[in-house]
Image (cartoon, rainbow, N blue to C red):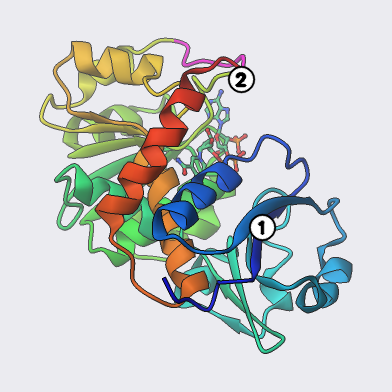
Amino acid sequence: MSSILNGKKLAVIGDPIEHSLSPLIQQAMLDELGLYCTYGRILVPAGTVAAWLPGTPGMNLAGFNATMPHKADLVPLMDTLSDDARMYRSVNTVVIRDGHFHGHNTDGAGFLRSLLDEDILPEGKKIAVYGAGGAARSVVLKLAAAEAKSIAVCCRTPAKAEELARSSARVHVVALGSPDFERTLAEADLFINCTPLGMQGVPAQFADFRFLDALPASAPVCDLIYRPLKTELLKEAEKRGHQTMNGLGMLIHQAILALELFAAMPLDAALMKKAVEKRLIPVLHQKV
Ligand code: NAP
């Protein structure tokens, strides 16, 4: 296939970077498309991305993805920013064209696409989001832009979410364990876990799952976690009859959207998802 990516390189930067799944995901798509382009990992130590960036055009890079801890540091370094990157104040995809850096963020749009794949439509819905970190920020702001009726950011440190709540009239903060939290769950049409609770390798887990009893059985329960593919939260939600969704769709869709930006062309998302799942799912079943 002819493409501006042929003969170029792509990469993911981060610190640490050795466990990133981006090379596996992106290479599966590049191979499926028959593109002559390799996708690697680059360790860029925390705090050094501003010094590293000017050298990238000389590295034959067509662009790169960014993970912890560079997503916020990249924002002021870009020549242009997409609306989403500006809204989240976070860049996960940088397209390099003619020595200029174009910053994007595909996390929120990737999450939205993963919901749509499961026929979960946020428009007009009351949504309870658990957690208020970086992933919650992109999910919450994208859901607000997608015209969710209201989004309650349920978190243990409400002060940290106040600024997020000020960014949209649809967003408000609810303290975990408060009477408001119970009320929020009872009225919710959708519940989304945006904390690392239940993630493989993270010792912390939900103290118990009784809070799920307050949630209407018709409300789908989503977890951004994809390792394990079925967290305890999702198992408990299934027991109670909820539709469930893990974070795999978000992980894959944010990558497809990034490749569309690198290649400057639309991709067949269903075909790309299938190619990625074939390589990724066996790896996700391995213990790390
Ligand atoms: P983060 O920025 O560190 O935020 C984590 C959030 O979880 C914070 O609000 C934190 O609260 C809260 N939290 C942590 N432990 C808690 C506990 N015991 N009780 C209540 N709240 C707790 O992390 P992140 O980048 O947002 O990532 C969150 C999760 O999303 C991770 O599991 C990550 O793997 C997943 N994720 C998935 C995708 C995907 O593509 N599927 C993409 C991004 C992230 P405090 O601020 O009070 O500490």
Under mark 1, the amino acid is Ala
Magenta stretch: includes residue 45:
no
Q: Give the image location of residue 138, x and y in percent.
A: 46, 56
Return the residue at label 2: 202
Query: Is label 2 within 8 A of ligand 1 (CB to nearest ligand atom)?
Result: yes
**Residue 232, placed above or below residue 165:** above
Instruction: Give the Cα separation between the discs numbered 1 and 2.
Output: 27 Å
Asked whether the beta carbons under mark 1 and mark 2 sit within 8 Å of each other, the answer is no
Residue 140 seen in the current view: no
Quarter of the figure that contains the N terminus: bottom left
Residue 94 seen in the current view: yes
**Residue 26, placed above or below residue 180:** below
Name which residue lies at 42% across and 24% down: 177
Q: Give the image location of residue 12, x and y in percent.
A: 66, 54
Quarter of the figure that contains the C terminus: top right
Residue at disc 2, secondary structure: loop
Image check: 218 left or right of 213? Answer: left
Q: Which mark is residue 11?
A: 1
Location of ligand 1 given as a quarter of the image: top right
Which range is magenta?
202-207
Lower sequence index among marks 1 and 2: 1
Image check: 174 left or right of 163? Answer: left
Image check: 222 left or right of 140? Answer: left
**Which residue is more in the foreground, 130 or 116?**
116
Name which residue lies at 29% across and 13% down: 236
